[in-house]
Image: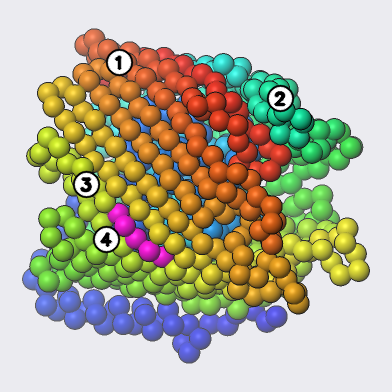
């Protein structure tokens, strides 16, 4: 296929840029002589905040991140957002399924850079420590216009934020668990008005000898896992400084080493495997500020290496290096108008034993957005567009339109529609045997409509409000050219990816939160219910029994409860999670049963002058539920965790 050519007729983004510029010049002509002066801008990614109108954005607050800093990202998302996490057990693979999509269809952004593997198209959330994030946000809904390939079902943002107060701070933490888990953490920060530096380090080892119910044996006897040990260690360092009022810089590097045994499935107990993951992520950003205008120049180098071996004699290493450069401008000609545009360049080189030679992918993307607030700032309108160019692909232009209308008493009506796409992973294209270099990008439309209410802390005047947070929404999306690996005709032992599926997903996402406070006590709750229908609308072959059936491992029903009680320096929380049945075959004739699980955590802290002592203890799976998220991958029965931390500020 010929490479994509750049011309006006085939690039609607150019028309969008022209319209934005004309609109901006008109607005500028009507603006006062002095441009709007922008306040200090955090170096964290802001695009989802400025141009995410119509999307639902869930934030995990700083208190939760501090209390659960010993957990991985997969655990936090499963317990607090409603995202279905395909987990294989503690320390094992954990990936997302958002709105019925694959892990590749959810973008994972670290301070504005996608850290999904271009080789398999996904990220293992069990390898990402919550301790390395200051802010975690989840955007529900397609976002290719903002983030490019991969953000078809939504995006997860991991952000690091410079210290809010000047001076020296320190934190040391120790955590342990009854399954043979022991972890240490340390965080040191020093900040001045124009400078800050922070370093975090962690080390974790776990034998993961957890109890589980063996469903393959009569009576489902309880056994102990012996082949799931893992070790992790990592360092994250960040430095921020400014030169005068116009120039800001930030630099980060994230090194991590993971070494783990992969427990065999209950149906394949004689198979043993081992995996080592190493990663080094470097990023930097320069911000230039003028009255009414910001210029961002950012870049990153991402390097991952995986060594996989098993007891059948296989020992292979795969690795990739991605270089990313981006220029992004933000212009505010008047208070009710924000205009943005930029260019993103990426180069990826990857190699694996199954590639036989190094593979390379280069991409160029042009993107633009405009946000306009009107009717006394009650209506917010956003238009965005992105055009990517990759040799060998006809990548569609990805537009997006969104709105947010303030109704009354903090209620808002939000909507969004956009075109989204996903490039095939390098493994899909080049893995031998089986890779298919003729694959097309997955692509399709998605739409959202929801009603939301969100009271800020300063607005919570009543002692009781059962609906301080409300989000009730409906979404609809249709994806074509969905990539699926299927057996090759006349060779059932050989599988190859093809653009065969068409999937229609639709559903409800409901979140309700409230609180009750009296004196020194506070009770808060968050309820969620998600309905997800993800149906195959095009037969793979004549007589395909999966037609109009639910996709495998996509539960139609998900629900949860987060309940917290605080009295002075004592806290008690309970997190409940429910998942409906998950079909394990395309014809929906076989499935895993639904399950309920619950976790309880007790916290206590004591402050003495500038020191703070914190103690936490928890029980995971307190109801001792026997369940599997993935077939023949048993999850642990009840076990305990405890930790202690000392901080100085």
How far apart are labels 3 and 2 at the CA level? 44 Å
| Mark sitting earlier along the chain (3/1) | 3
How far apart are labels 4 and 3 at the CA level? 13 Å
- Which region is colored magenta? 471-475
Residue 473 is one of the magenta-drawn residues: yes
How far apart are labels 2 and 1 at the CA level? 40 Å
The answer to the question of whether label 4 and label 3 lie on touching residues, with beta carbons closer than 8 A, is: no
What residue is pinned by disc 1?
Answer: 605
| Mark sitting earlier along the chain (4/3) | 4
Between 111 and 135, the one lying in front of the other is 135
| Mark sitting earlier along the chain (3/2) | 2
What residue is pinned by disc 4?
Answer: 451
Quadrant for the N terminus in the image: bottom right
Q: Tag 4, which secondary structure?
A: strand
Quadrant for the C terminus in the image: top left
Between 138 and 630, the one lying in front of the other is 630
Q: Furthest-top residue in view?
A: 608
- In front: label 2 or label 1: 2
- What residue appears at the point 30 percent right and 15 percent down from the top-left corner? 605
What residue is pinned by disc 3?
Answer: 467
Image mark for residue 221: 2
The location of residue 224, given as percent across then percent down, is: 70, 21
Query: Taking 630 as reference, is 373 left or right?
Result: left
The vertical placement of 5 against 126, above or below, is below
| Mark sitting earlier along the chain (4/1) | 4
Q: Quadrant of residue 501?
A: bottom right
- In front: label 4 or label 1: 4
| Mark sitting earlier along the chain (2/1) | 2
The vertical placement of 178 against 407, above or below, is above
């Amino acid at each position: 296929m010929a490479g994509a050519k750049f011309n006006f007729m085939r690039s609607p983004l150019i028309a969008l840029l022209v319209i934005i510029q004309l609109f901006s010049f008109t607005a500028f002509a009507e603006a006062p002589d002095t441009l709007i002066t922008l306040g200090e801008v955090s170096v964290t990614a802001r695009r989802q905040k400025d141009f995410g109108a119509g999307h639902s954005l869930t934030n995990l607050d700083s208190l939760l991140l501090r209390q659960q800093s010993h957990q991985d990202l997969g655990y936090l998302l499963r317990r607090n957002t409603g995202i279905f996490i395909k987990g294989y057990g503690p320390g094992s693979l954990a990936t997302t399924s958002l709105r019925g999509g694959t892990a590749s269809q959810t973008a994972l952004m670290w301070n504005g850079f996608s850290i999904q593997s271009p080789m398999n198209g996904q990220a293992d959330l069990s390898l990402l420590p919550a301790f390395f994030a200051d802010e975690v946000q989840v955007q529900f809904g397609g976002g290719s216009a903002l983030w490019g390939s991969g953000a078809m079902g939504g995006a997860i943002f991991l952000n690091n934020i410079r210290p809010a107060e000047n001076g020296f701070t320190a934190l040391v933490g120790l955590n342990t668990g009854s399954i043979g888990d022991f972890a240490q953490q340390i965080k040191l920060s020093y900040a001045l008005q124009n400078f800050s530096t922070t370093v975090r380090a962690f080390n974790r080892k776990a034998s993961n000898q957890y109890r589980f119910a063996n469903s393959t044996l009569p009576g489902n006897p309880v056994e102990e896992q012996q082949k799931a040990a893992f070790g992790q260690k990592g360092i994250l360092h960040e430095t921020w400084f400014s030169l005068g009022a116009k120039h800001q810089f930030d630099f980060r590097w994230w090194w991590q080493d993971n070494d783990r045994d992969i427990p065999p499935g209950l149906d394949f107990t004689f198979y043993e495997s081992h995996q080592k993951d190493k990663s080094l992520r470097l990023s930097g950003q320069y911000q230039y500020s003028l009255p009414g205008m910001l210029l961002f120049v950012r870049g990153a180098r991402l390097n991952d290496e995986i060594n996989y071996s098993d007891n059948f004699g296989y020992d292979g290493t795969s690795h990739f290096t991605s270089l990313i450069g981006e220029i992004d401008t933000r212009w505010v000609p008047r208070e009710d108008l924000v205009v943005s545009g930029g260019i993103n360049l990426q180069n990826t080189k990857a190699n694996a034993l199954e590639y036989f030679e190094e593979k390379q992918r280069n991409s160029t993307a042009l993107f633009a957005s405009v946000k306009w607030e009107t009717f006394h700032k009650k209506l917010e309108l956003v238009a965005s567009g992105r055009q990517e160019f990759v040799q060998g692909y006809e990548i569609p232009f990805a537009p997006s339109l969104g709105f947010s209308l303030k109704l009354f008493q903090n209620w808002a009506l939000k909507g969004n529609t956009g075109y989204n796409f996903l490039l095939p992973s390098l493994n899909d294209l080049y893995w031998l045997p089986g890779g298919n270099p003729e694959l097309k990008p997955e692509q399709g439309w998605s739409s959202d409509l929801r009603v939301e209410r969100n009271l800020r802390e300063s607005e919570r005047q009543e002692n009781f409000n059962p609906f301080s947070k409300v989000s009730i929404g409906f979404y609809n999306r249709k994806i074509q050219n969905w990539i699926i690996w299927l057996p090759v005709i006349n060779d059932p032992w050989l599988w190859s990816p093809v653009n065969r599926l068409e999937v229609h997903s639709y559903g409800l996402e409901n979140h309700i939160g409230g609180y009750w406070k009296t004196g020194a006590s506070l009770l808060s709750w968050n309820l969620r219910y998600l309905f997800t229908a993800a149906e195959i609308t095009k037969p793979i072959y004549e007589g395909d029994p999966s037609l109009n059936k639910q996709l495998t491992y996509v539960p139609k029903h998900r629900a949860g409860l987060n309940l917290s009680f605080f009295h002075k320096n004592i806290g008690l929380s309970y997190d409940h999670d429910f998942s409906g049945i998950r079909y394990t075959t395309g014809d929906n004739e076989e499935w895993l049963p639904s399950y309920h699980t619950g976790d309880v955590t007790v916290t206590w802290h004591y402050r003495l002058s500038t020191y703070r002592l914190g103690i936490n203890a928890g029980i995971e799976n307190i109801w001792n539920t026997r369940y599997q998220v993935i077939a023949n991958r048993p999850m642990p029965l009840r076990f305990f965790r405890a930790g202690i931390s000392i901080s100085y500020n």
